[in-house]
Amino acid sequence: MTKNELKMWLASLPKVELHLHIEGSLEPELMMALAEKHQVELPYGNIQEVKQAYNFENLQSFLDLYYFGASVLQDEDDFYQLMWHYLLKCKQDNVVHAEIMFDPQTHTQRGIGFEIFMAGFKRAMQQAEQEWGQSSLLIMSFLRHLSEASAIETLQAAKPYLEDICAVGLDSGELGNPPEKFVQVFEMAKSLGLKRVAHAGEEGPPEYVWGAINSLDVQRVDHGVRSIEDPKLIEYLKQSQLPLTVCPLSNTKLKVFDHMEQHNILVLLELGLMVTINADDPSYFGGYLNDNYFAVIDHLAIEQHHLLQLVTNSFNASFMSTALKVEWLSQLKGNE
Ligand code: HPA
Ligand code: ZN
């Protein structure tokens, strides 16, 4: 198959997205419209200028713009619009199931409570489910640059909404904020029946991946690409099949790898790890899920069987019910 044929085939497959920050799907058009609606002053004159600002040196330089962008999200309908636009992209990209992260502290710190964003998210998710059978779950992520006490307070505030939240996560600036800082809140989340994921090994060293595994008891590691530096960790990830949610365009945009040719996802896959492809913050990093697959098709020696394995992994690594998994995996088998 040519690269173009591979892309068309890939686009037609049902897929799962496991690492997506809903605040990172805020497109410049919606950002500007909401800024006007709420009279928020943005340092950008037009959409072109917003896009030009998205040139990042590292994770922190992105996070500064990402938290600032989120300040236009204020009422229930803003959160509905944000979620609805992302779910429409899922439909377009044939993402049949998405596990979507949100950062409550980004909003509660501005006086916007769970009742506002949860209602908006839920309305969009239910509508997409009714209109085209979209399946989706929510992951509540704690901001690791804030204290554990703040994360605990957030978990308490989320208690009336736990029926609509499947897992907790950990994101924001990784370096200097190791997983061990959040042991207590992750234990509390576990005892409330929540699953656990955490960003680790994006900018942080392999020790942070071990920390997420041993101290937070995670079911998945978000990113995890720096695991390659520790052979014992690679062996552990291979044996345990603990999934890594890898985000190729994010990793090159934030200079975890200088060029896509240097990305290690294919190496990790060939070593037998349970790796998956995801978009992370598509509006900031230049593409949604299919674009991330296309980027690796363009720049790595990736073949059809690798792609099928990555898509199969995305279902296996998800928190969807076993019955649903079996159903989708049998559909996928018809596409070999
Ligand atoms: N890493 C850490 N925090 C984040 C990210 C990321 O890739 N995206 C949004 N918050
Ligand atoms: Zn992320």
Image (cartoon, rainbow, N blue to C red):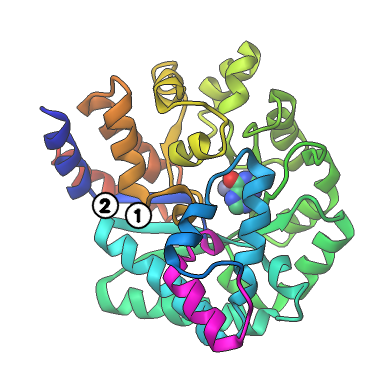
Q: In which quadrant is the N terminus drawn?
A: top left
The residue at 47%/24% (across/down) is 273
Instruction: Residue 41: say if magenta.
Output: yes
Residue 172 location (% of width, % of height): 69, 50
Instruction: Name above or below for residue 70 compared with residue 204.
Output: below
Pick whichever, 161 or 275, lies toward us. 275
Q: Is residue 336 visible?
A: no
| Rendering coords of residue 25 (x, y %) | 47, 61
Left or right: 286 in relation to 151: left
Q: Amino acid at mark 1?
A: Ala
- Magenta segment: 22-42
Picture disc at residue 323: 1
Looking at the picture, how far across and down is residue 200, in whole percent? 66, 36
Q: Within 10 Å of the Cα at label 2, are there few (<14), some (14-19), or many (20+) other Cα atoms? A: few
**What residue is shown with label 2?**
327
- Residue 154's place in the image compared with 169, above or below, is below
Q: Is mark 1 within 8 Å of ligand 2?
A: no
**What amino acid is found at the position of numbered circle 2 in the picture?**
Glu
Judged left or right of residue 5, residue 313 is right
Asked if marks 2 and 1 touch (Cβ < 8 Å), the reply is: yes
For the point 66% across and 62% down, the residue is 67
39 or 113, nearer to the observer: 39
- The numbered disc on residue 261 is none
- In the figure, 109 relative to 143: above or below? below
